[in-house]
Amino acid sequence: MLCAIITNAAICACFVPFLLLGSKKVRQVNTFWLVGIYWFLNGLVNLRALPLIRSEVLRGWLLRLSDYYDLMDIPLALSIYAMAAGTRKLRKQLLLVLLGYVAGETLLIRLKGYVFSWPVVIGVGVLLILVYSIMGLWQYLKKMEHDRLENCMAFVHGAFLFAYGTYGIIYLLFYLRASATFYNQTDSSLLYYTSLLLSAVVTGIGIWGYGWRGSGRTLPTRYSSSSS
């Protein structure tokens, strides 16, 4: 019952960052569109975990969508970091890493197939997100003053660090287990959806703080959707 409650709450929470795009201030920032889409897709692919979804056709469609989303997940997260990068050098680095990851992902799947490639692709991707999340938080802590987007992205970095860190633990438990005795599907699901719930809530708090709490400092035009 606890697992069911947390699962339902986590899936609902995934749609909150997307709904927060209803704020005009939030809609004007390209980064938040990517964050909202990221969490919307997370909620969508996890709908099959809801007991209300009983149609086998719909569940099958959501399962196939989940397979495709697994390939989009890391590139989308890297795109969020690149869009919010504070310097041109960091943005260029992130875009190169993103292109390299997509190229490697595509080549490996073509040569070895999806089943063989999935653990490699996910493992490398999770490691990349953890590294850039830690770097983002470290850069944030080094600065004495921050604009509102940087404050919001600190929440996003923290949420991603927690979410992908937890996912990495589940990944290791599943793929490096010595036997099925050391892996419990229910416990892993509970851990996954708890992580998803907390990460979505933390992201939502960060975006809400940008869109609804005071005027704050004026952002540079590079963050505006109307900028180049």
Image: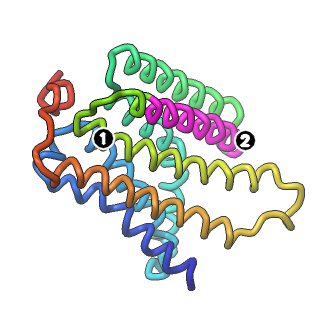
| Residue 124 picture quarter | top right
> Between residues 180 and 65, which one lies in front from this camera angle?
180
* Part of the protein shown in magenta: 115-138
Residue 168 in picture, x, y percent from top left: 65, 48
In the structure shown, which secondary structural element does the residue marked by tag 2 occupy? helix
Q: Residue at x 53, y 66 (%)?
A: 194
| Residue 183 picture quarter | bottom right
Q: Residue at x 50, y 72 (%)?
A: 7
Q: Amino acid at mark 2?
A: Phe
The numbered disc on residue 116 is 2
In the displayed structure, would residue 87 be above or below residue 172? Answer: above
Q: Amino acid at mark 1?
A: Asn
Toward the right, the furthest residue is: 178
The numbered disc on residue 32 is none
| Residue 8 picture quarter | bottom left
Tell me if 191 is positioned left or right of 51 in this view.
Answer: right
Residue to which mark 1 is pinned: 151
Residue 207 in picture, x, y percent from top left: 27, 50
Circle 2 Cα neighbour tier, 10 Å, few/some/many (<14 / 14–19 / ≥20) = few
Q: Residue at x 53, y 50 (%)?
A: 162
Residue 123 in picture, x, y percent from top left: 66, 40
Toward the front, the furthest residue is: 144
Q: Residue at x 66, y 65 (%)?
A: 188
Viewport quadrant of the C terminus: top left
Viewport quadrant of the N terminus: bottom right
Circle 1 Cα neighbour tier, 10 Å, few/some/many (<14 / 14–19 / ≥20) = some
Q: Is residue 139 magenta?
A: no
Query: What main secondary structure does the magenta stretch of the protein show?
Result: helix
In the structure shown, which secondary structural element does the residue marked by tag 1 occupy? helix
In the displayed structure, would residue 104 be above or below residue 170? Answer: above
Mark 1 vs mark 2: which is more N-terminal? 2
